[in-house]
């Protein structure tokens, strides 16, 4: 079972652990306009899937802004930031923060993404939210990069993520 930490305490992650080399499960989420969004599986573009506990926290907001900026010039990648936030709150965040290069989506309906990718936090104050994680999926649908951030309150390794996207071309 995969784990992460929240303020130093170990948190078990619930669901099917997706590993590098696995095919990325295709799941349906809800975007800020209440439209269905499918992620995972085969795609015309590389997929960058970023999971965060809540856009309403400083670290998640900073991470989302950073990825929005970094992928602006990358027409080879579709970027998705996923949380359990309600679509209405996500829409407000995106409009306030100028998030327009990525798709922000919610897994609040059935937690299908979180359990299919093994990032659902199961036993702490953040129980039921997504752990901080990043997946890079190549066009064939294979996971080529995965990072479950060791400490939920820390940001991912942006350099490694961007390098994985370049290598997935």
Image (cartoon, helix red, strand yellow):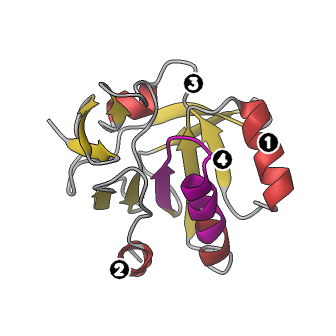
Q: Which residue is mark 1?
A: 91
Q: Which of the two discs, 4 and 2, sits closer to the camera?
A: 4
Mark 4: few, some, or many residues within 10 Å (few <14, many ≥20)? many
Q: Is residue 2 above or below residue 169?
A: above
Marks 2/1: CA distance? 32 Å
Earlier sequence position, callout 4 versus callout 2: 4
Earlier sequence position, callout 2 versus callout 3: 3
In the displayed structure image, the side of residue 115 where residue 20 appears, left or right? left
- The reply to whether the C-beta atoms of the residues labelled 2 and 3 are less than 8 Å apart is no
Earlier sequence position, callout 2 versus callout 1: 1
Residue 104's tag is 4
Residue 70 in percent (x, y) is at: 60, 77
- The reply to whether the C-beta atoms of the residues labelled 2 and 1 are less than 8 Å apart is no
Q: Which of the two discs, 2 and 3, sits closer to the camera?
A: 3
Q: Is residue 109 above or below residue 139?
A: above
Range shown magenta: 47-66
Q: Residue at x 56, y 31 (%)?
A: 84
Q: Which residue is mark 2?
A: 167
């Amino acid at each position: 079972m995969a784990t992460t930490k929240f303020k130093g305490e170990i948190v078990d992650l619930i669901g099917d652990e997706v590993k590098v080399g696995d095919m990325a499960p295709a799941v349906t989420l809800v975007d800020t306009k209440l439209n269905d969004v499918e992620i995972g599986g085969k795609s015309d573009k590389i997929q960058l899937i970023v999971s965060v506990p809540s856009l309403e926290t400083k670290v998640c907001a900073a991470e989302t802004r950073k990825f929005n900026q970094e992928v602006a010039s990358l027409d080879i990648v579709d970027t998705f930031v996923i949380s359990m936030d309600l679509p209405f709150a996500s829409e407000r965040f995106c409009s306030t923060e100028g998030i327009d290069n990525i798709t922000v989506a919610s897994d609040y309906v059935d937690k299908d993404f979180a359990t299919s990718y093994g990032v659902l936090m199961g036993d702490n104050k953040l129980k039921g939210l997504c752990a901080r994680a990043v997946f890079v999926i190549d066009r064939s649908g294979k996971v080529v990069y995965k990072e479950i951030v060791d400490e939920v309150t820390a940001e991912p390794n942006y350099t490694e993520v961007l390098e994985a996207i370049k290598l997935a071309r």
